[in-house]
Image: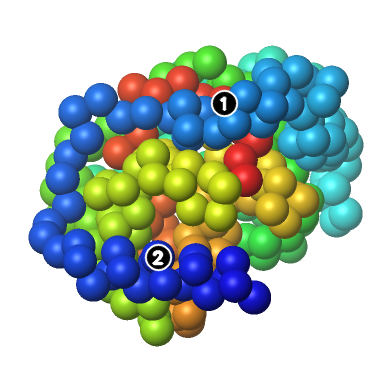
Amino acid sequence: MKAMYSTRLFLLTLGLVVAGNNVLLAEPKSGYEYIKDETRALQDDDFDNPGMLTVDRGLELFNSLLPGASKRCANCHQQDGEGLDSKSIARYPVVERSTQTITTLQDRIIACTERTGVKALAPDDKNLVALQTYVRHLARGERVAVDTEGLDALLARGEKLYTTRYGLIDMACQHCHVFYPGTMIRGQHISEGMTNGFPAYRLDIGEITTVQQRVQQCLNLMRAEPFASGSEELRLFELYMTVRSNGLAIETPAVRY
């Protein structure tokens, strides 16, 4: 109880004393730089990394017929996804410039599976998350490379969401991840909130988590009503946060607290 009170007090203090606009990070750092040595060792060993179970599940689904499907993902993209371009994967989310429509990697997978006859998968569907994790894992080591040309308006909307105070805690994402990375809270260092490791395995909850799910979890911690799964707001969050991560190597599945 005392620890919970201390955490809330710390967060409230940050919310009261920090003000101002978001700033660009001159050299973004992966969350890997902020985790404990034992967590790094867990991530680095594919036999010990608990997120690899989801990668294996995604591989199985990729090479299998999904319920209601007329063909497998592998029919178009080759066995084990060998036909997929890792550099293209690293460019997601992508934006249709004429309509300013954001397409995340998860959106692309949903569209692909629908073309095989599968009913549209919900954003939090475990099979969808597994497929997303496997596909992004195929780009592990590639640098995040979201094309930002012509995205000023969308990125401004994403930044607005990122710098808005939420909930009873009255804090914005930037308060932790822009102003106070490296600060200790609950025995962990606050990271810069980069997305290069997502979907990531969260030790705190014991499961793979997407970027959008992580934003929802943070909003819950702020005692705020989370945006609905698959909403435009969460797409804007993902776009903006991934652009902040441009240049970092993809680590999926990262291991984070």
Q: Is residue 41 left or right of residue 52?
A: left
Q: Which residue is mark 2?
A: 10
Q: Amino acid at mark 2?
A: Phe
Q: Which residue is mark 1?
A: 251
Q: Give SS at disc 2.
A: helix
Residue 157 percent coordinates (x, y): 22, 61
Residue 24 percent coordinates (x, y): 18, 39
Q: Earlier in the sequence, mark 2 or mark 1?
A: 2
Q: Is residue 253 left or right of residue 245?
A: right
At x 31%, y 29%, the residue is 28
Residue 165 percent coordinates (x, y): 28, 73
Q: Give SS at disc 1.
A: loop
Circle nearer the viewer, 2 or 1: 2
Q: Amino acid at mark 1?
A: Glu
Residue furthest out toward the left? 20
Q: Is residue 28 visible?
A: yes
